[in-house]
Image (cartoon, rainbow, N blue to C red):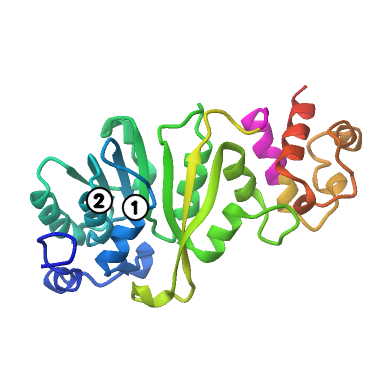
């Protein structure tokens, strides 16, 4: 019996089902159930929420979410080897866990979940950033989710919460902070995982804002930010010249210096430029 429920410890589950982590799937398993329950608690009170979990593996975080009182959990797993272990958890929590075998990038969460919805996941490293960008850039806002509580490599977590002037500041920080409050809530060393990754990890909690922090057209803002940071060492007048023939005039109208570089521009400045370009 484990410390949080009546199911076997995760090491026994992994041994029983032969679940060695696959590098090709970006898998690193968290085996400490007290730690997975602590991660679940970072998402707040889940008793009135449905939870989307991506890449549950043998189900450590899944068990943490259910033990912490999540109303219902949808666990999306691409690795068929993990399904028997997840079905064992579903039997222990009748009616509260749905397991879907498939690719998270192809999933429509609203076909399975009822609002309010929170996303809590130890994301597979190979699709984590892509999923985050998708969740931050839906066609309509507010999104389907209330909050995201996600584990990333420490370097990615720092990019999400980075401030202007830092090397970590870039497209991910602008997209995240434009539409959400983002903060790092936990750090985890490599030895917390099996197998240990080469880098430290961190949990980031993002709360969706009811509307973006500053007005801007989403598509225009994304183009501006992508162009600026794709050539982040260049001055803005050079990096953004493909967006408008009179880009220096546009930069001045937005209150920006044409000789600044992307990492010096605050979120508000990017939004102002997007408005000028869209006018």
Judge whether residue 115 is colored magenta.
no
Q: In the rendered structure, does residue 215 fall within the stretch colored magenta?
A: yes
In the image, 122 versus 68, the foreground residue is: 68
Viewed as shown, does residue 218 lie left or right of 142?
right
Q: Position of residue 58 (x, y in %)?
A: 22, 62
- Quadrant the N terminus occupies: bottom left
The image shows residue 168, relative to residue 276, as above or below, that is: below
Identify residue for label 1.
41
Please tell me whether the stretch drawn in magenta is mainly helix, strand or loop. helix
Local crowd size for mark 2, using a 10 Å CA cut-off: few (<14), some (14–19), many (≥20): some
Q: Which residues are magenta?
A: 214-226
In this image, 239 relative to 161: left or right?
right
- Residue beneath disc 2: 68
Judged left or right of residue 17, residue 247 is right
Most distant residue in the front direction: 45
Is residue 157 shown above or below 190?
above
- Percent across and percent down for residue 64 are 25, 56
Q: Position of residue 249 (x, y in %)?
A: 91, 33
Point 76% across, 55% down: residue: 232
Identity of the residue drawn at 67% across and 31% down: 214
Q: Mark 1 or 2 closer to N-term?
A: 1
- Residue 261 image label: none
Nearer to us in this view, 194 or 147: 147
* Neighbour tally class for label 1: few under 14, some 14-19, many 20 plus, Cα within 10 Å: some
Q: Residue at x 86, y 32 (%)?
A: 250
User: Of helix, strand and loop, which one carries label 1?
Assistant: helix
User: Tag 2's secondary structure?
Assistant: loop
**What is the distance, in whole Å, between disc 1 and disc 2 at their CAs?**
7 Å
Q: Position of residue 77 (x, y in %)?
A: 27, 52
Do the CB atoms of the residues marked 1 and 2 lie less than 8 Å apart? yes
Give the residue displayed 48% in from the left and 71% down from the top: 200
């Amino acid at each position: 019996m484990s410390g949080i429920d009546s199911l076997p410890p995760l090491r026994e589950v992994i041994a029983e089902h032969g679940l060695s982590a696959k590098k090709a799937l970006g898998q690193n398993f968290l085996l400490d159930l007290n730690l997975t329950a602590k991660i679940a608690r970072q998402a707040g009170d889940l008793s009135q929420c449905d939870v989307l979990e991506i890449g549950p593996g043998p189900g450590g975080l899944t068990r943490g979410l259910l033990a912490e009182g999540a109303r219902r959990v949808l666990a999306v797993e691409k690795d068929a080897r993990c399904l028997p272990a997840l079905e064992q958890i579903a039997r222990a929590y009748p009616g509260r866990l749905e397991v879907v075998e498939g690719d998270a990038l192809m999933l429509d969460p609203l076909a399975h979940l009822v609002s309010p919805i929170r996303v809590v996941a130890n994301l597979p490293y190979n699709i984590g950033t892509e999923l985050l960008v998708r969740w931050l850039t839906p066609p309509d806002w507010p999104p389907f989710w209330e909050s995201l509580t996600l584990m990333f490599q420490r370097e990615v977590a720092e990019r999400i919460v980075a401030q202007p002037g830092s090397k970590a500041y870039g497209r991910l920080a602008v997209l995240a902070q434009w539409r959400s409050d983002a903060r790092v809530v936990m750090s985890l060393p490599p030895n917390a995982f099996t197998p240990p990754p080469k880098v430290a990890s961190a949990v980031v909690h993002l709360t969706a804002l009811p509307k973006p922090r500053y007005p801007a057209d989403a598509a225009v803002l994304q183009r501006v930010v992508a162009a600026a940071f794709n050539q982040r060492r260049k001055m803005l007048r050079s990096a953004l010249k493909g967006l408008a023939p009179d880009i220096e005039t546009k930069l001045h109208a937005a209150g920006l210096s044409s000789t600044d570089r992307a990492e010096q521009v605050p979120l508000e400045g990017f939004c102002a430029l997007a408005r000028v370009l869209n006018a």
